[in-house]
């Protein structure tokens, strides 16, 4: 076969083959691990947070190609964002940045969003002062 | 890059001699078998010859017992629905094994919505039908028992002689799906006392687009496709002559070369499994060990702490074509029902891939697959939080429990807030 056909688009395949930010963070400030009840995939995101901003992010994923690509892309997207910004992160950003996912695989991007939010919640739990700040900003925004 | 096709259960390439036999039937001998002139009569002869070749492959008495359909799925539908409708007045109960192919399972579900009832007989952890349960499931209302010869996922060979004896004693017709065995294992419809048997030539180097249904003269079925009076009135529609001719030649060659093919793939199957077992920690074979209870083409593997679609994709990117029963590769997000029926732990079903061997595979191919797959497993484990958690004693292995940590399923349920199906 001279041509290579792929199950996913080239961006998804690229992130699956060469995932960004794969691994764990030593002394992470927040760690979130979530599972997809639908299929059984599991995703873990670790965050390093400094001055209310995400300095670094890492992922580990037990799941299919699109789950690995989604977590790779999600960690890329959220680096450098403030906690506030990250709190309103949506799975659609992952889907768009990946150039689309098959309909049956959209839940993989949702899992990435959930893992990120779980990591942020973990951070907030560990740092109640940051939590208060986020709550204030939330009420201002509302 | 080396290319290794290890998905022969999905399809096989058409043999050159099969292709050559088909060629004139596309252009020169294009006639419709229903026509009464020279063009029609000529292809009628070709049809008869193909029926004889199919009959010979499965030990059928006469070519008149062979019906051509479009593929294995259509044959299953005709066998199940055709028998159910034909025997409606006798009873509306059917018995199948829990690990039948979806074409059988879903035909049954269709009938259940219309008032038929069905008993799905359980299997052992190796995928073998429970004969005592089968016997107990048959009632005076049972009009058909369907048990496949070889399982399409895990390669288990069913005890067909015993199944046949039970059906004969209870006087219920038996339909045997031989989709995963025809051309690779000897089939004798008379020895089993089978009322119906189905298979398709594209599994043994014939073309797609043709399926076969053997029907014993005594078995009653009605057509489920209506139109002209082709195939003895049991399957309307113009016969796919080129595919039927090619299928017949493939059947004849399969019969000739059966033992030669098995002698080629059986050692490769052993070499592959032994190699993987030795080089990939926490891997397990689902279904019976290679030997008399397993077809010599199939290996169904679960590699722990990693998911099957990722394995499949990385194999593909390394030139190796495999299949998987993981929920991630299914459009319904459900694990293979066969893996569910043998009671496989969800985590292991999730890490499942299926490798099926064929004529063209070599020892060098197998060694390449073993070496490459070991790298793939360790790459994916490096990305997997489950491998990490196993190494830290948070979760335990299902394949080789250490006694430390909770089960993967328990952990998965905790992090997802819901147990996986």
Image: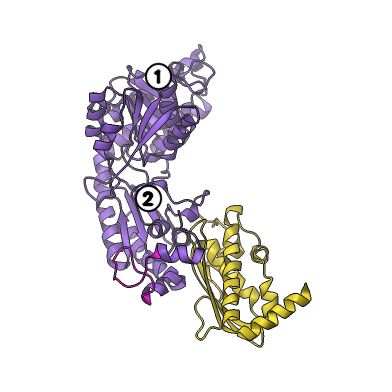
Residue A38, compared with residue A137, is above or below; it is: above
Q: Which chain identifier belongs to the purple chain? A: B
Q: Residues within 10 Å of mark 2 (few under 14, many from 20)?
A: many
Range of magenta residues: B391-408
Q: How crowded is mark 1: few (under 14 residues within 10 Å), some or many (20 or more)?
A: many
Residue at 33% across, 17% down: B217
Residue B348, compared with residue B72, is above or below; it is: below
Q: Can residue A120 be seen in this view?
A: yes
Magenta region includes residue B332: no
Mark-to-mark CA distance, 2 and 1: 32 Å
- Pointers 2 and 1 within a single chain: yes
Secondary structure type for disc 2: helix
Q: Give the chain letter at badge 1.
A: B
Colour of chain A as rendered: yellow
Q: Check whether the beta carbons of the residues at disc 2 and disc 1 lie within 8 A of each other.
A: no
Residue B339's mark? 2
Q: Give the chain letter at badge 2.
A: B
Please give left or right for residue B290 compared with residue A126 in the image.
Answer: left
Tell me the quarter of the picture where residue B174 sits: top left
Residue A11, compared with residue B97, is above or below; it is: below
On the image, the x and y values in percent for residue B33 come to 48, 18
Residue at 37% across, 75% down: B391
Image quarter in which the N terminus of chain B is found: bottom left
Residue position marked by numbered label 1 in the rendering: B87
On the image, the x and y values in percent for residue B15 come to 39, 40
N-terminal label among 2 and 1: 1
Residue B162, compared with residue A60, is above or below; it is: above
């Amino acid at each position: 076969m001279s041509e290579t056909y792929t199950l996913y688009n080239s961006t998804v395949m690229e992130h699956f083959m060469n995932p960004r930010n794969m691994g764990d963070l030593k002394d992470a400030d927040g760690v979130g691990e979530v599972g997809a009840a639908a299929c059984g995939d599991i995703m873990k995101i670790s965050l390093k947070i400094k001055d209310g901003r995400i300095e670094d992010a890492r992922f580990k994923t037990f799941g299919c190609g699109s789950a690995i690509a989604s977590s790779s892309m999600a960690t890329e997207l959220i680096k450098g964002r403030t906690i506030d910004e990250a709190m309103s992160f949506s799975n659609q950003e992952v889907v768009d940045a990946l150039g689309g996912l098959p309909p049956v695989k959209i839940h993989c991007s949702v899992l990435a969003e959930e893992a990120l939010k779980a990591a942020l919640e973990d951070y907030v739990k560990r740092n109640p002062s940051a939590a208060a700040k986020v709550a204030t900003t939330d009420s201002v925004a509302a | 890059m080396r290319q290794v096709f290890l998905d022969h259960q999905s399809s096989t390439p058409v043999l050159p001699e099969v292709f050559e036999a088909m060629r004139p039937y596309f252009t020169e001998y294009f006639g419709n078998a229903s026509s009464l002139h020279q063009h029609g009569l000529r292809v009628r002869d070709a049809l008869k010859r193909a029926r004889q070749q199919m009959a010979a492959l499965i030990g059928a008495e006469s070519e008149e017992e062979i019906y051509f359909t479009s593929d294995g799925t259509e044959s299953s539908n005709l066998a199940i629905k055709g028998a159910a409708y034909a025997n409606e007045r006798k009873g509306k109960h059917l018995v199948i094994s829990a690990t039948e192919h979806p074409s059988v399972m879903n035909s049954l579900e269709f009938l259940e919505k219309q008032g038929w009832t069905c008993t799905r007989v359980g299997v052992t952890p190796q995928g073998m039908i429970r004969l005592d349960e089968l016997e107990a499931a048959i009632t005076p209302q049972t009009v058909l028992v369907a048990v496949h010869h070889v399982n399409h996922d895990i390669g288990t060979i069913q005890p067909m002689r015993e199944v046949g004896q039970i059906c004969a004693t209870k006087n219920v017709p038996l339909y045997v799906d031989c989709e995963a065995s025809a051309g690779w294992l000897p089939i004798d419809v008379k020895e089993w006392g089978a009322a119906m048997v189905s298979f398709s030539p594209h599994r043994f180097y014939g073309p797609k687009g043709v399926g076969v249904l053997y029907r014993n003269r005594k078995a009653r079925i009605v057509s489920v496709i209506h139109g002209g009076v082709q195939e003895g009135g049991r399957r309307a529609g113009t016969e796919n002559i080129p595919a039927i001719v090619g299928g017949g030649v493939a059947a004849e060659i399969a019969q000739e070369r059966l033992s030669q093919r098995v002698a080629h793939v059986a050692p490769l199957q052993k070499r592959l499994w032994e190699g993987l077992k030795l080089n990939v920690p926490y891997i397990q074979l689902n279904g019976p060990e290679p030997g008399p209870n397993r077809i010599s083409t199939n290996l169904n593997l679960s590699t722990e702490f990693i998911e099957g679609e990722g394995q499949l994709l990385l194999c593909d990117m390394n030139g190796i074509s495999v299949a998987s029963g993981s929920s991630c590769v299914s459009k319904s997000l459900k694990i293979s029902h066969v893996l569910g029926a043998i009671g496989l732990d969800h985590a292991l079903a999730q890490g499942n891939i299926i490798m099926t061997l064929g004529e063209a595979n070599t020892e060098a191919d197998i060694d390449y697959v073993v070496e490459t797959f070991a790298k793939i497993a360790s790459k994916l484990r490096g990305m997997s939080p489950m491998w990490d958690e196993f190494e830290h004693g948070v979760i335990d292995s299902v394949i080789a429990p250490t006694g430390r940590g909770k089960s993967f399923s328990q952990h998965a349920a905790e992090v997802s807030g819901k147990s996986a199906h």
